[in-house]
Structure formats: C-alpha cells, structure tokens
Image: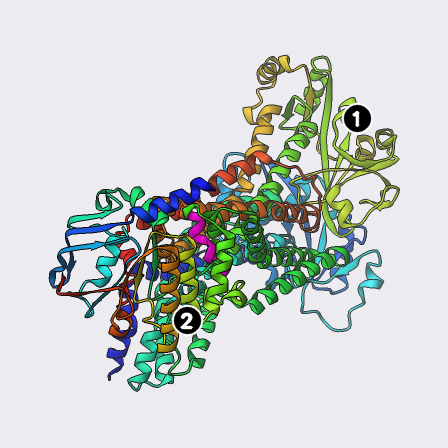
Amino acid sequence: MTTWTLATALLSHWRRRPLQFGALLSGLALATALWSGVQAINAEARASYARAAIALDQNGLANLVSPNGGSLPQSAFVRLRRSGWNVSPVLEGDYRFGTTRLRVIGIEPLTMPAEAQTVDLGNAGDLLSFISPPGTLVVSPGTAEKIRGQTDLALRVSDRMLDGAAFVDIGLAQSLLRRDGELSRIVIAENQRPGLEPFGALVPALTVREPNAQTDIEQLTESFHLNLTAFGLLAFAVGLFIVYSTIGLAFEQRRPTFRTLRCLGVSLRVLAVLLLAELVLFALAAGAVGVAIGYLVASLLLPGVAATLEGLYGASVPGTLSLRPEWWLSGFAIAMAGTLVSSAQSLLRLMRVPLLAVAQPQVWGRSSQAGRRIQVLAAAALLALSGALLLWADGLQAGFGILGCLLLGASLLLPAVLSGFLTVMQRTSSGALVTWFCADTRQQLPGLSLALMALLLALAANVGVGTMVSSFRLTFVGWLDQRLAAELYVAARTEPEADRLRAWLATKVESVLPISSVDAEIRGQSMQIFGVVDDPTYRKHWPLIAGLPDVWDRVASGEGVLVNEQFWRRERLRIGDQLDLANDWKSTVVGVYSDYGNPKGQVIAGINALTSRYPQVSRLRYGLRVQPDQVADLRASLSGEFGLPPDNIVDQAALKEQSRRIFDRTFLVTGALNIFTLGVAALAMFLSLLTLSEMRLPQLAPVWAMGVTRRDLALLELLRPLVLWLTTFIAALPLGLALAWVLLAVVNVEAFGWRLPMHIFPYEWVRLGLVVLAAAVVSVFIPLRRLAGLAPSELLKVFASER
Amino acid sequence: MERYICAIVLILAAMVIALRNLSKSYETAEGRLEVLRGIDLDLGAGDSVALTGESGSGKSTLLHLVAGLDRPDSGEIVVGGRDISKLDDRGRAAYRRTEVGLVFQQFNLVPSLDVAANLAFHAKLAGRHDPAWENELVERLGIGPLLTRYPEQLSSGQQQRVAIGRTLAARPGLVLADEPTGNLDETNGDAVLELMLSLSKGTGSTLLMATHSQRLADRLDRQLHLRSGKIT
C-alpha cells in the first residue's frame, strides 16, 4: 500500500464533507489573521518608537540634567568642555509655526557625539547652512508638508526624522523658544578622556540621568499594545475553538477508517505521521490565507491605531504598513502552533485507542462528569485569583491578570451555568416537548460549549469595552463643556500684535483669558506649566477633582498650584504637598483637575507667578468670554481689524467638534476589533451548529416518529440556539460590566493616569442583544433549512433495522 | 375519566386495518427499486401478526407505511375507517402520536431523557399520561431500578424493555414492531417478546411485527410472508 493510497483514503473524508473542511480552514485562517494582524500593528508601532528614540536621542546616551527638572545654564556646558569633557548641549521645547506645533530640538552639531547624530550634516554646505542665520529646520517629509509656507526658515527634509519634531541649531532654538543661555540637558558621549575632573566637582548642581533600556513612549504605550495583544489573543483563541471542534469531530468520524487501515497493516506510527502531515498541510494553506487577511486587517486598522497612539500618548506612528519577513514567518508559525495545539488531544487519543476498539463515532465533544467538575473547579480558582489580584496586587500587569482570570474563569463556568439553568427548566416543566427540549439542549451543550464560551468572551468584551468607551465619551464630552468655557479662542502672530489685541479686546469682551505656558521638567517628567488669570470662568467651570475650599484664591495669589490627575496619580501627590517647579520655584499643590486625553503632566499656576519666573513667556493665545450671540460679530471684527487668518480664530463649537472627532477616531480600532471578535464567535457558533446538525437525526427521528411534525421540530431547532445565545448574552452582561469596571478603575488608572466614572448604557445592550438575535437566526438558518427540507426517507434510515 | 376510557375503547374497537393495492418504490443508484407491489391486507382489532421475509423483502417499508412515517406511491391504508395515506404531515403526526406505538430493532430511545422520562414521553405527547399504568408497566417490565439511568447506561435488553414500556404506556391501538429482538440474544429476545405479547394482549392492541425469526413468528396469531414486495 503506497503512501499516496493511504493519503487518499484519509483525505477522502474532507472531500465528502466540504463544509467541515471549510470550517477548519476558515477557523484557522481567521485565528491567524487576527493574531498576525495585531502583531503587525504592534511591530510597526514599536519600529516607529525605535526610530523616534534614535531620532530624538531620548535615551541612547547619558545626560546631565537639573535635579528639579528645570533648565540648565549654558555656562555649565562651557565649563565642562573647557575641562575636557566630550559633551554636547541640547535645548528642547514646543514652538508653533503658524498653526503647527512642533517639538523643536536645538543641537550643536560640532560637539554632538557621533552615535547621537541622527541627521548627517557632514557636508560642509549643509553644516554651514544649519548653523548660520537664518538657520535650517531639519524635519520629516510629512512635517515639511505641514509647515511649508508658515516659516521663513530653510527646510531640509530627512527620512530619519520623526513627524512633529524639528532639529535646529541650538542658537536658533534658544531664540525661537526665548530661552537665551538656557539648556534642557547636556548629552555625555560614551568615549571620554581618562582622568577628567568629576561632574560633581565641576557642575555640582546637575545630576547624571542614565539611559533607559526602554524609551518613554514605549513605556507609555505598553498598556495599549498589551491591550491590542489581549484582543488578538482573544480572537485567536476564539478561532482556535473552531479548529479544535472541527478536528475533534473529524477524528471521531474517521475512527472506523483508522481501524480499517490498522487492520490492513498500517502501523500506528505511519498513520500518525500521515495525519500530522495532513494537519501541517492545512496549517500552511490556512496560514497563508490568514497572513494575507492579517495584512489586510492590519493595513485597515493601522491608521486608526496611529490616531489612537497620537491621541492618547502623543506617539507618532505612520499610518502605513511595511511587509516584514519575520512577521510572515511568525504568522505561519502561529498557524502551525494553533493547529498542533488544537489537534494534540485528538492525536493522543488516536495513539491510545486499541486496534479492535468499537469504531462507532462517539458523541462529539461529550465530556465526562469528572471533566466537567474539574472545569468548574478551575473556573472557581481563576475567579478567586482574579479577586485576590484585585485586592492585593497593583500595576498594569496585575490589571490585565485580573481581566484574564475573570474572563477565562467565567467562560469555563458557562457550560455548568447553562446546564444548571436547563436542568431547572426541565425539572419544573411538565410538558413532554418542553422536557425533551431542555434535556436535548443540555445534551448538546458539550458540542456547543466551546462556541458558547467564545461567544461569551466576545460579548463580554463588547459590553465591557463598549461601556468603557461610552463612559469615557460621556465624561469627555462633559469635561469638554467645562474645560472649553471660552466662546472664542484667538492667537496673535507676534508679540506686538498680541499687545494690540489685548488693548482692543479690553472693551469688546467680558473677559480675556490668556493661554500662556512654558515647558518644564518636573520630577523628571516633561511637563507644561500654564498661567491663568483670576476669573469667574475658572471658578465656575474648571473640572476639579479635589482641592482646598479656597483653591482659586490660592492659585491667584501665587500661593499654590493645580496639577492634572495623571501627574497627581503618577506621583502619588496629596493636597498640601510641596512641588519643586522649574527655576527654584516651589509651590504647594492646592487642587487636582481632570485632563483627559493628555499624555503629559500639567501644572496650573497664577499668571503673575508664571510671568515673574518666565518673563519671556509667550502671550500670543487667548480665550475670550462673550455672549454666544456676539461670537460671529466678534470673529468678523477680529478678522477685519487684525487680518488674522481663519485658523487663528477658533470658536468653541469648532474646537469641541474637533476634539470629539479625535476622540471617536481614537476608539475606532477598539470598535473594529470588537466587531471582528464577535464575528469570529458567531462563525464558531454557526459552524458548531452546522456540524451538530449532521448528527441530529438519531435524536430527532424518534421524536418525529412519535408524532411531532417536522415543522414543530424545525421550530424547536430554531428556538434552541436562540435560548442558548440569549442565556449567554444575559450571562455576558454582568461579566462585561465587571470587565468595564476593571478597565476603568484599574487598567486605565495604571495606563493613562486617570480614573473615569462608570456609566451604564442599557440602550447599547438592547442593540447588542438584537445583533446577537439576528446572528443566532442567521447561524441556525442553514441547519434549519436542511432539517425542514429533510425527506421522511432520511429520517426513516434511522429506524432501518437492516442498515 | 369515563369519557377518557370510552375514547380509548372506541380507538381500540375501531382499529381495523385494511391495506389495498399498496405499492412503494425508491430511487436508487441502480434505478427505481419497487419494494412493495400491490399489497392487500386486513388486520382485526387485537390481532397479533408476524411479518416474515428475507432482507430487502419490504417488511420495514410496509411497517413504515402503516405507521404513517412514509407515503405509498399508490394504494390505500385505511385505519379505523380513515385512509391515512391521504393525510397531510400534521395529520399523520397526530395519527402516530395518538394511535400508533413503534418498537424498533435499534430501540430508538430518546438519548437525552432518563428512563422514567422516556417511559412517559409518548404517553404525554398522546395526552394519555397515566402514572398508575406506568408504574404497573415498570413493575411488569422489571425496570424499576433503571428509572434514573440514561439509555447509554443500559444494556440492549434493558433498552428494549424500556422501548416496549414507552410504547405501551401510551396505550396505542396499533403496535408496530420492527425486528424488536434483532439486537438481543435468544434468552433476552424471548423474554422481551413474551412481555410484548402479553402486554399488548392485555391492552387489546393490534400487533404487527416484522421478524426474520420463524421461531418468534410461530408465537403470534398469524403469519404473513413477504417476497419480492408481495405477500405470499
């Protein structure tokens, strides 16, 4: 008997069951697609962070910094160079070129260590134009596109630059940022002459900040990528449920064939190798399809992910995907691993079955009482672990641990809960058909439990993430209403124009609220300090979370400052704590305000306190309070009087709309992954029902023979998945809410630094319930049509004594 | 209660079966196969009739037609004065539910129900659930200790006892048995047949049983032999 003959015998199973074959390949391809899609997105984003780290030299080398996070005097750099230290100065800050805000990084190319040189300025002409007035901005192609025409400075485009950042000569940076004689940090080259006087003696006021293995942005975005990976894993697991079920069924159905082949002299080893080869072949085929779909999914989702990363963390990631060989390979590897994991149990069972064992296929997926008990115990242990983590552990990993244990525990518990529910229904009913319906549904549970568990996970994720996003949105919109209290926002182009504007506005509006800020490093974090005037607008509207009763009086008098929630939580600050602000400025924390969507820490001080420390602070931007019906007139007057371009006069409604748009775009990817996962779960359910429908005749025929019409049986078959889906949906609601609570109260606090109130959205549940109902009807449609169209002769075959 | 008993008595009394010129054929890979060719047959109330013949002679097909599980190509199946071959799907289902009891070689118990629920199932569907009668059947069939077990936990003989109990619990006017002892050894087969005969006699049911076994056929009132789709 040749190998080919054997293979033909084994493969004939799939030829006769094309639906089962399709289920196997589509389950595997979908699992691979969603997993590898998410991995591609993560890989692209991480590659982008690495580029950013190189471009900005954030953490590649050690730096000398001010311990209080403020600026350093340029004299410190001069002293170090004169003592022979190989160091280079850097000044960083944000600067607006027209309407575009850029991170300006001032460097000194002649002293910058080679390992930190992102842009090659080796060419004499390039170097000269970089350091000579009026100066050159080195920017990415995307940034160049944005600021072209908005600056008189020469632009030099470099592919190695990050979007939103610009390299300039340090002299130009000091002039743009109005920080003459100041530096942000001093970069220390790796190679130094031996025997130099130590830093402690030369610049005792500065400290050395060692390079980090991980970039700041990598640390910030870790939770987001973990979140994506969790979603990918969830979708992968849901897909594997399909594969596991299909392979298990195929092995059971082929047991007579295996026995015949063994009786004909095929060794167990040869049989196992052939089956393994068959699985590998399928894994390769489905893996190729999966990787291709994964690429498509990733390229569709990446712009959304880029928007999320920019919106939540300020991380710049390109919206286009590059093909990486390692990603292709990992896609195939995961398809292969998934296939082998899903088939391990079936292969092991094959190895253990005695040659002459009864070759009747066993009821698919039937698990023993002991197996069910173990499952319930494991569920209880996981739920207990989830509770323990909640009570005693903290950190982002613990947050995801709570989520994982909760979801897995609940899904393992689901079959037992459904079985209990059906048992109670069966015991309390007296009608023969209801009793049979409950008992028969309960008997089918093992075959459907994997699909139902997948459905529970997908639904709970949908409810949980939906609740989180909707709570976030509701809070965000309310917060925007408070935060954007001014009716009009105006930006002057120059300081003299700003002076003129202030004088002009004095008689035209109810109040003028300056928006002045400086960049500072506080407690080692890059932050902004805003100055505010004492105005009722702040007292009435500013979204304070905590604060002293006379908080605004204290801020106005310069006695205290407000901090945003993320900084407050990150630094575990308390009201009354002393804070070292920049330039020997110390102040007391007197209040905390919510500041959603901002990745950075922020401080609000009285405007006088700020300007006394930073006399050169920019005073170009203002919020204007006017009666809403006067906004249009004032806007027109401002344009007429000052010739300000439209971008420099923005009304409140436009700003809110823009913020809401950014918010919605931010959660597009979450919504898309939610839908994908739900789709895969629905497919798993459909395939399980379809597969089970092939084995329903022995259960249905006796009931039909005893006088239940085919129509009634078909209706009961329709009702069955509806009951199961509905019960699973009801079970998913509390689980989803628990998931939302963990996301809002644990994961978000750890990941973003802010905590959101949880809101309940029953309307969304009703909508999801209707989707579930529709999916249930669709999933049962083909099996039902098959049953309704079944000829009596098919049912009679069940009773044939001479089968 | 009185009306209920009267109704049963009427069903049993009316259970006179007449088959007229009954034919049935099937499409097969080799072409059309004529299984039954012009069968004529009369059965009286309380008769017990054995249907014998070789494999493929049409015994099961005949039983299926009489049970209303399938329709003939031509001919009449008159039961209690009604031609059941003219009934629609719903009508034939009602006929099976209330007037016919089926016993199969493969037992065909409902796998998801325990023995007690299986026993009561058909009677409940027929609207003739009678716990006292079921208890008596349990007693006589000796399946008391098995009531909480599921079909898969029973031996073949035990399963067939339950199947007979289920059929008789519904007090059908007509019991159709297709090789009821085909899956049992001789001792078990004899015991099961004995029970079925005595119980159906006790309830006044008409019994039509297909069997290969001449030994078993000899124990019934009448024998009919099928050959090539005809009664000989």
Proximity of marks 1 and 2: CB atoms separated by less than 8 Å: no
Residue B81 — which label?
none
Judge from the rendering whether residue B176 lies leftward or rightward of residue A162; answer left or right: left
Start-end of magenta stretch = B115-125
Residue shown at the point (60%, 17%) measured from the top left: A635
Question: Gap in Å between the C-alphas at discs 1 and 2?
Answer: 88 Å
Residue A539 — which label?
1
Quick one: B10 or A376, which is closer to the camera?
B10
- Residue A546: x and y in percent read 81, 37
Quick one: A317 or B53, which is closer to the camera?
B53
Quick one: A640 or B60, which is closer to the camera?
B60
Q: Check disc 1 and report its element: helix, strand or loop.
A: helix
Inspect the image, locate mark 2, and give the three-letter code of the amino acid beneath it.
Answer: Gly
Q: Chain of mark 1?
A: A
Q: Which residue is mark 2?
A: B157
Residue A702, by quadrant, is: bottom left
Q: Chain of mark 2?
A: B
| Foreground label between 1 and 2 | 2
Judge from the rendering whether residue A793 lies leftward or rightward of residue A291; answer left or right: left
Judge from the rendering whether residue A61 lies leftward or rightward of residue A305; answer left or right: right
Secondary structure, magenta segment, majority class: helix
- Residue A278: x and y in percent read 34, 72
Residue shown at the point (69%, 30%) measured from the top left: A483
| In the depicted structure, whether residue A138 falls above or below residue A98 | below
